[in-house]
Amino acid sequence: MSSPRRPGKNRRHAGSILVFALAILLGLFAVARRVWVSVRAGGVPNAWDIPVLEWMVSHRNAAATDAAWFFTVLGDTPAMTILALCVAVLFSWRARSVWPGVLIALTAAGSVALTLVLKATLGRARPSLESVLAPIPSSFAFPSGHTLNSIAILGIIGYLSILILRSLWARILLVCTLACLVLCVGWSRIYLGHHWLTDVLGGLLIGGSWVAVIILLHHFVLLKNRRTVRWLQL
């Protein structure tokens, strides 16, 4: 017969996970800085960014351009905000708890903060090709805010959906759909000439890591320690 967990041990376990999650978050800035140093060295733009953007520009057509604008609008702040609010209300009602909404709000706020801080810190210029489709955003390029916020918000929505859905196939279908949406948003930013490839890759990496931190905290600190952190239960 297993002995019950002691509250002190549970608190120490939760604290260790919290420290680990914060270490991951701080590591994001180091990763972003390393990518920026590689970009400034000159090798990455010539090997990846410029050829990919030129290929996208040379293969534009009316249908693909309409699709790119659709996914760009979908990944923009107003659309992501509306989606996050609707899903937060739905999940909070379904779970009869405010915490699904709190998790979504925390994820969204953190992703926006990371975008603003990193753009201002790194100050990378956007592509300046003549064939770039206007209007071009006035903010800096790295990381792609559309991509970072999309993967963060859709990622936490996917995680909460997995906790609610009972069918394995429904979970797989939802995760695949959300992943495709994120990739399409990232593709649209390069296709329109608003971002370099490495901007989008950076957004995927940083946004994915941020939502992983939120999921890690929720799963190991909240769900695994319900008796000692009742006020944080989902």
Image (cartoon, grey):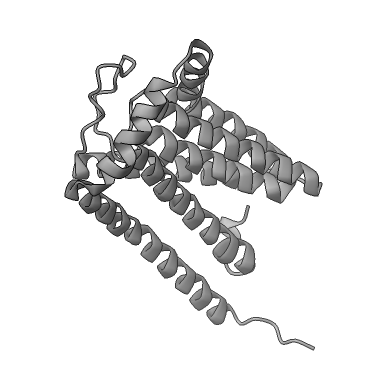
Residue 70, percent across and down? 51, 19
**Residue drawn at (42%, 40%), measured in percent from left and top?**
148
Name the one closer to the observer, 28 or 4: 28
Residue 51 can be seen in this image: yes
User: Measured along the vertical axis of the image, is residue 93 above or below residue 106?
Assistant: above
Name the one closer to the observer, 85 or 31: 31
Residue placed furthest toward the top: 62
Residue 209, percent across and down? 45, 53
Residue 215, percent across and down? 55, 55
**Residue drawn at (50%, 24%), measured in percent from left and top?**
71
**Residue drawn at (52%, 25%), measured in percent from left and top?**
82
**Residue drawn at (33%, 45%), measured in percent from left and top?**
114
User: Measured along the vertical axis of the image, is residue 155 above or below residue 141?
Assistant: below
Residue 129 image-quadrant placement:
top left
User: Is residue 105 toward the left or the right of residue 223 in the image?
Assistant: left
Residue 173 image-quadrant placement:
top right
Which of the image's four quarters has the N terminus?
Answer: bottom right
User: Measured along the vertical axis of the image, is residue 89 above or below residue 111?
Assistant: above
